[in-house]
Image (cartoon, rainbow, N blue to C red):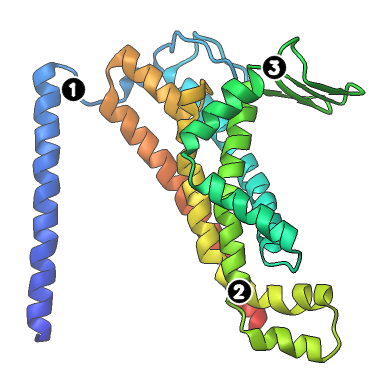
Amino acid sequence: MSKNKKIFFQILLMLAVLGFLGILTNNLIMNLTRTGIGFNFNWLTKPASFSLAEHPLPYSPSDSYAWALFMGWMNSLKVIISSLVLASCIGTLIGFLRVGKNSFFRIITAGYITFIRQTPLLIQLMCWYFVGFLSIRNNSFLNLSNRINISNKGIELFGLNLSSEFSALLFGLSIFSSAFIAEVIRGGIQSVPIGQWEAFRSLGISEKQGFIKIIIPQALPAFIPGLTSQYLNLAKNSTLAIAIGYADIYAINDTIINQTGRAVECFIILLCSFLILNLVITKIMGFIDKSIMKTRI
């Protein structure tokens, strides 16, 4: 195919996509106009008129919808960042044990990964919330010198209070994502040629030192793409928080839609919020990948 024909088909495809998007936009505007709702964001300045169980900054029902959405976004970021850190730690540990020489740990971690990956995340969140926290009787399950207290109200950790909703979402997302991260770690380690293992062993280097100083640095580039994918999935999976009553941005959007009927505007806000977050995660992981590649050159 000649260059001119390729350009022609590319322009034709672009025009077809733009035409399709134009038809969808026109239908949306016509339907909104017909219902009398219209399309605007003026409602963001109106009082929200609903309370929030969790808000990192001062909030009251008299505050605007915009402030309520911001509180939801802060709650989402709080659980996403915490889950990313915890899932990475657990997943890395499970991944290392999965490729270790100890057959007992290999069997246990294989069973852990299989069970977690084959169980829907929504069911796991429900179990963590209703079985793990709300089922605790006498308002307390564990109390260690008033420093760590687990109850049906959540977790109190060295003076930091974590609600049962936040705790269930944190553990649910972290445990679920850790199983996939563990497989990423395992795959990255096993991608290192067997000759590299035999080389450091022939030099008399211990398994621990050879694993840390030789195998892991070579496996790092293979970790990044898989970890990026799992981090993006974790961020998007956090919207399941609505199932256990955690006031994240999706749950607050749902409440606003019920009150105002502004479904289109709310979904645009939601889509843009997660699009920006995922682009930031992708950019950070890309920067880490480039840094690793530079150190290897």
Q: In this view, does 159 lie above or below 122?
A: above
Locate residue 208 relative to residue 246 in the image: left or right. right
How crowded pointer 2 is (Cα within 10 Å; few <14, some 14-19, many 20+) is rated as: some
Q: Which of marks 1 and 3 is nearer the N terminus?
A: 1
Q: Which mark is residue 136?
A: 3
* Dot 1 crowding, Cα within 10 Å, few <14, some 14–19, many 20+: some
Callout 3 crowding tier (Cα within 10 Å): few <14, some 14–19, many ≥20: some
Residue 187 location in percent, x, y? Answer: 57, 68
State the separation of the CA atoms marked 1 and 3.
48 Å
Q: Is mark 1 on a helix, strand or loop?
A: loop
Q: Is mark 3 on a helix, strand or loop?
A: loop
Q: Distance between the residues labelled 1 and 2?
A: 56 Å
Image quarter of the N terminus: bottom left
Q: Nearer the viewer, residue 150 or 48?
A: 150
Tell me which amino acid carries mark 3.
Ile
Q: Residue 38 carries which label?
A: 1
In this orientation, which residue lies closer to the viewer: 258 or 59? 258
Work out whether 246 lies above or below 102: above
In the rendering, at what x and y percent does residue 95 appear?
65, 60
- Residue under label 2: 190
Asked if residue 42 lies left or right of residue 151, the reply is left
- Kind of residue sitting beneath label 1: Gly
Q: Is mark 2 on a helix, strand or loop?
A: helix
Q: Distance between the residues labelled 3 and 2?
A: 42 Å
In depth, the one of 192 and 42 nearer the eye is 192
Q: Visible in this render: residue 78?
A: no
